[in-house]
Image (cartoon, coloured by chain):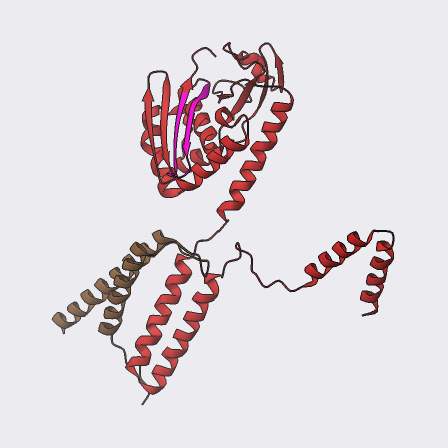
Chain colours: A brown, B red
Amino acid sequence: MMSFPATTWDIGILSAACAVVILMASEVISPHYGRTSILLDLRKLRIAAAAFVVAFIAIGIANIVTLVSG
Amino acid sequence: MNGNSGTVRDYSSALAGQTRSQVSASTALRAENSRPKKKRSHFQFMSTLTIGIALIAVGGASLVVSYVFSSVVITLAGLGLVFWGVTILYISPSKYVPENVLTLLSLSTIKSIDRMLVNMNYRGKTIFVHPRHLKGLAQGYVFVPYDSSFRGSLPNEEQLAEERMHYEDPKGIFMVAPSQGLVDLVEKELDVNLATVDMEYLKENLPRLLTNNLRIIDSIAIQDLQGSVRVDIVGDSAATLCKAVSKETLIGNHFGCPLCSSLALMISKVVGKPVTIQENKVNDIEGTIVNTYRVIDRA
């Protein structure tokens, strides 16, 4: 039977993990890696990390509300 | 093929009148040009757009497959790839210009002005003036006196409003400041006319703009001294360009690099008086610039 196996908790945990990795990356990596010449905007990277954190918190609150009300 | 053969024959007949060494050099150059280039340019960079779209595509495909097979592992992998794809698309800088290009463009412009002034024997110290009260002059100008010992006054406001290039009393060249662009950009970003603010406003807002928003330097400190303004700048790119200007031009120390001359214009506009670069110390190894601007009271 075809179904989407991931729950909102899974997506929330994935968001949290992504946020941690991105935040750490924004602190330690250089905006310009010479070997591949890929350019990064570190300020936007930190904003992306914050967005993932917000997504994680929103999913967490939504789940708690569902548990309490249901 | 025939066209190519014809071209080669034309070259051969054109080369007939040359000496053997010239012919061999030309042949070597042609061979070099026709050889495929293996080394890629330093300025060529891989687009993060391609990487982002590829990650999103693979992630989307993984999500479809995970839906069909109900696989948690593939779902999480797909979500991760989509997240990273979107993130990479978002964090890619919208515009990219190699620093070397900007440095060389700025340097060549200043060298051109330097050569012109030196050939015309204008040896005076550059005076930056951003008039506030003149009709029609809504931008910064530089006045380069003919005499290196010039200590007199600038032409009066009526004379300057004529927007002539040459002035005889005092003798000098009056031209639009090449670094006016940064002043305009600062005013646009701060959404303020610098003629209406004071030094305190500049000290408070300019460092944040230049370091956080425009990101052309790492830090800047402005000190308002008695009759002069000291500016300490930290930034590798700015220091490298400033050092190159000082080293490769005769007027560099007082005409200033684009950043130093822009700051002179900003100070002139804020205080409402002409300004000169009194002292310019650059350390390109440590990436520091220390400028002292003298505010001229007699305008």
> Residue placed farthest to the front in the image?
B20
The foreground one among A12 and B289 is B289
Location of residue B212 with respect to A49 vertically, above or below: above
Q: Is residue A32 left or right of residue B14?
A: left
Q: Position of residue A68 (x, y in %)?
A: 12, 70
Residue B57, quarter of picture: bottom left
Residue B51, quarter of picture: bottom left
Counting the numbered discs, the total is 0
Q: Position of residue B26 (x, y in %)?
A: 76, 55
Residue B188, quarter of picture: top left
Q: Is residue A51 left or right of residue A32?
A: left
Residue depicted at x 85% and y 54% = B14
> Residue placed farthest to the bottom in the image?
A1
Q: Position of residue B60 (x, y in %)?
A: 40, 75
Quarter occupied by the N terminus of chain B:
bottom right
Task: Check if residue B88 falls in the magenta segment.
Answer: no
The foreground one among B178 and B269 is B178
Task: Check if residue B287 falls in the magenta segment.
Answer: yes
The foreground one among B31 and A36 is B31
Most common secondary structure along the magenta stretch: strand
The foreground one among B175 and B13 is B13
Residue depicted at x 37% and y 28% = B231
Q: Is residue A50 left or right of residue B17?
A: left
**First to last magenta residue range:** B273-293
Q: Position of residue B260 (x, y in %)?
A: 45, 30
Residue depicted at x 18% and y 65% = A61
